Image (cartoon, helix red, strand yellow):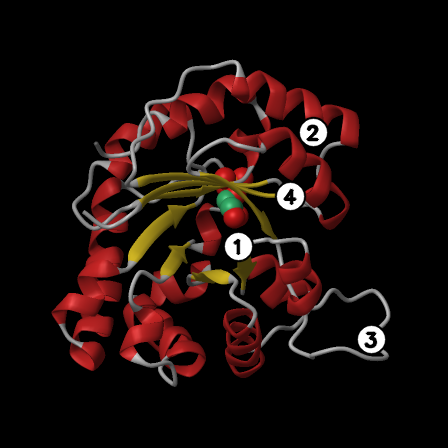
Amino acid sequence: MRKQIAAANWKMNLSLQQAEELIKALLETNHELNTQHLAVFAVPFPYIIPVKQLLNGRQNVFVAAQNCSANKNGAYTGETSAEMLQSLALKYVVLGHSERREYNHETNEELAKKVDIAMAHQLHPIFCCGEPLQIREAGTQNSYVEQQLKESLFHLSAEQLTGFIIAYEPIWAIGTGKTASSEQAQEMHAHIRNVFEKQYGKAVADSISILYGGSVKAANAVEIFGQPDVDGGLVGGASLVATEFSAIINSLKK
Ligand code: 13P
């Protein structure tokens, strides 16, 4: 079975004290994680080291960054390089979140560069894609998402894409309380897998973990994660509440 992943995206939330309390509360709860399961915490940059220290020694639990620069190093005030993240022994980085695409104008082309520089520094991208409401209403979401994937990822080799992590996050479902139905999620996840199968073959497509994001909570995680092509979730709001995120971790497919 490909990896099943519960990824928390804290976005720009929590003080350091609140972050530490949240992690401690999560560590006190029993999670049904096996070797195919991962819990990942995409935390703000200043919390990478303290959260990593709290999680030290835990199996299958990792910290992620929420972004990295497309540039190697130099005069880019306020940016963080992949090399810096590697030097913290980080293994995961979220790339192409819709909020960064919208507020920081990240394009598919720039994201291709971020994917390359991240992978060159042994970071696994959690690559986000997903359509805005007007595209969903026009019914063109499949080609929209396909183009995001092609323009940012199709220069990679089959080897590089083996075990890759994609997060499908329909923008109209993020932070709105409006979740895609499990059928809508499954339909898009199957489409995404098919896009990779056409280009790279079935073995590569089957190895890719495709996470769903958009108003995932304890109450809907079992149903969404239970879909055959949904391999877990990228969770915003509900990941800030220990009981919610614990239940979400325990909702991963066994
Ligand atoms: P919500 O779970 O708050 O809808 O956010 C989803 C998301 O953007 C995760 O990256």
Is 13 situated left or right of 65 in this image? right
Task: Report, in whole angstroms, how far the alpha carbon at label 4 lies from the one at label 2.
Answer: 9 Å
Residue at the spot 31% in from the left edge and 54% down from the top edge: 210
Pointer 1 and pointer 4: residues touching (CB < 8 Å)?
Answer: no
Is 56 situated left or right of 191 in this image? right
Q: Callout 2, which amino acid?
A: Ala
Mark 3, residue position: 76
Q: Callout 1, which amino acid?
A: Lys
Q: Position of residue 47 (x, y in %)?
A: 72, 41
Q: In the depicted view, which residue is nearer to us: 39 or 149?
A: 39
**Above or below 41: residue 207:** below
Pointer 1 and pointer 3: residues touching (CB < 8 Å)?
Answer: no
Q: Callout 4, which amino acid?
A: Val
Task: Report, in whole angstroms, how far the alpha carbon at label 1 lies from the one at label 3.
Answer: 23 Å
**Label whose residue precedes the other's in the sequence (4 or 3):** 4
**Label whose residue precedes the other's in the sequence (1 or 3):** 3
Mark 2, residue position: 19
Task: Report, in whole angstroms, how far the alpha carbon at label 2 lies from the one at label 1.
Answer: 20 Å
